[in-house]
Amino acid sequence: MHLPLIPDIVIILGSSVLIILLFQKVKLPPIIGFLVTGVVVGPYGLSLIEARREVELLSEIGVIFLLFVIGIEFSLKRLATIKKAVLLGGVIQVGLTTLVTALASHFIGLSWPQAVFIGFLFSLSSTAIVLNLLQANGEITAPHGLLSVAILIFQDIIVVPMMLFVPILAGQSDNTLMTLALLLVKVVGLVLLIIVLANYVVPFIFRQVVQTRSRELFILTTIVICFATAWLTSSIGLSLALGAFFAGMIISESDYSHQATANILPFREIFISFFFVSIGMLLDIQFLLNNFLQVLLMTFAVIVTKSGVIGIAVIALRYPLRTVILTALSIFQIGEFAFILANTGMQYSLLPETIYQYFLATSIMSMALTPVLFKFAHQLTDLLVKVPGAKHLEPKTMAHNQGTSPSKELSDHLVIIGYGINGKNLARAADNTDIPHVIVELNAETVRKAKADGEHIYFGDATEETILRHLFVHKA
């Protein structure tokens, strides 16, 4: 049997290994290595990849797994605490970025419909890259992490109305307002369904599964829930990635979320590499070299404009200056959903071919710079907060901090692996001597009973590094 995709997978992963190994020597982030791999093996490089559509499908699976894991780290309760950031922060960021970009585009000679559409494109940030970096650095629940996630959630939702608005901009509308109203009804129905699934259906299913003590069945169930929810949201017109995020939040309400994360991570690491490679494959390297100065100036303009607008949005939410800067340095880039939206605009002649090439080059350049700026974000923030006059931007009353830094959660504590006779005796002794402790146990029924008794206990396999990290074993 001959599978045409296998040679392409070998080429992509093999090239990634070599390039990332080289990049690690000079301390460049792996994401840049994947982007460069895409440029090298893609149609504008050595043209080694034939099954481009199949590679794009694999990349979409990577984004699904990434958003699923991020969703697990959230919960419906935590999302409710940042609803103001989702709505107000998202509206300000997307609205202002669209307005500023549209004015600049019209000034250089584009028509208003084209200018507004380009504003749509530039207002979107990269969910996959930002969330991957936040999670890898343990900052997903820090204040700037929560704000970044909030604004990205709004962007992922608003991209659907943007796509529906494209025919209106092109003067080819067909009852779009009715479509938007129907979409709103579907979204409300989906949210209600997710609440029911999170609180009743999924916990019941997992209780039945974990009683079998079958690791394979647990992994299969987790993946089915992930893809089924993603497919459900896709069927009502939202993105697969947003559905995967919702699926993760559904599982986050159960006692089995940490073990689910540990099982999914290997899948995420493999498939997300295809996503970054597929983005690199879009770049026309010859166009970039011929117009390098213009692309560099446009990238700088995007970073400055979006960072400024994001800063205004976070200041409006009354967060401290440090959080303002860190959030701005996280989501300044142009995102992957902008590529999908750009294809729709091309179909309606809202994006001239030359502008499209500039857009692609600028987007990928801003994506490539994201891990670099992210790496030095805290050092840059330390410098910027000391700039004369910067303190005047601090709001007089601060927003309540809903984020928690993992480093402040648990330290100098006892990790008890297993809650049998010895585990119970050890926990009792720790209670009597006021030693903080956390327990991990693989028997779901034992976990349920211990939780009912008020014990700080988690379901999970202690041989998994992810589980131990959640228990802060490195600070125990």
Image (spheres, grey):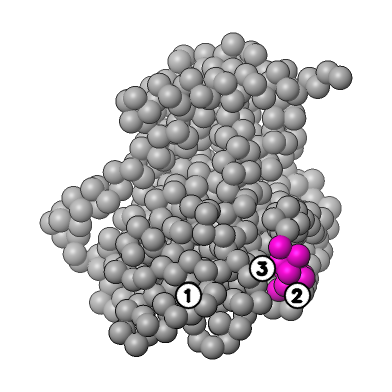
The kind of secondary structure the magenta stretch mainly shows is helix
Of residues 383 and 40, which is closer to you in this image? 40
Q: Earlier in the sequence, mark 1 or mark 2?
A: 2
Query: CA–CA distance between discs 1 and 2?
Result: 29 Å
Q: Secondary structure at mark 1?
A: helix
Point out the residue furthest to the front here. Answer: 421
Give the number of callouts: 3
Q: Which residue is mark 2?
A: 204
Q: Choose between 361 and 255: the one closer to the eye.
A: 255
- Crowdedness of circle 3 by 10 Å Cα count: few (<14), some, many (20+)? many
Mark 2 crowd level (few <14, some 14–19, many ≥20, 10 Å Cα): few
* Extreme residue toward the top, this view: 46
Left or right for 319, reference 72: left
- Describe residue 19's horizontal placement relative to residue 196 as left or right: left
Judge whether residue 73 can be spotted in this image.
yes
Do the residues under discs 3 and 1 have CB atoms within 8 angstroms? no
| Span colored in magenta | 202-213
Up the image or down, 447 lies above or below 4; here it is: below
Three-letter code for the amino acid on which mark 3 is drawn? Ile
Query: Circles 1 and 2: CB distance less than 8 Å?
Result: no
Q: In the depicted view, which residue is nearer to us: 220 or 288? A: 220
- What's the residue at 73%, 58% (across, down)? 214
- Which residue position holds label 1? 422
Q: Is residue 405 magenta?
A: no
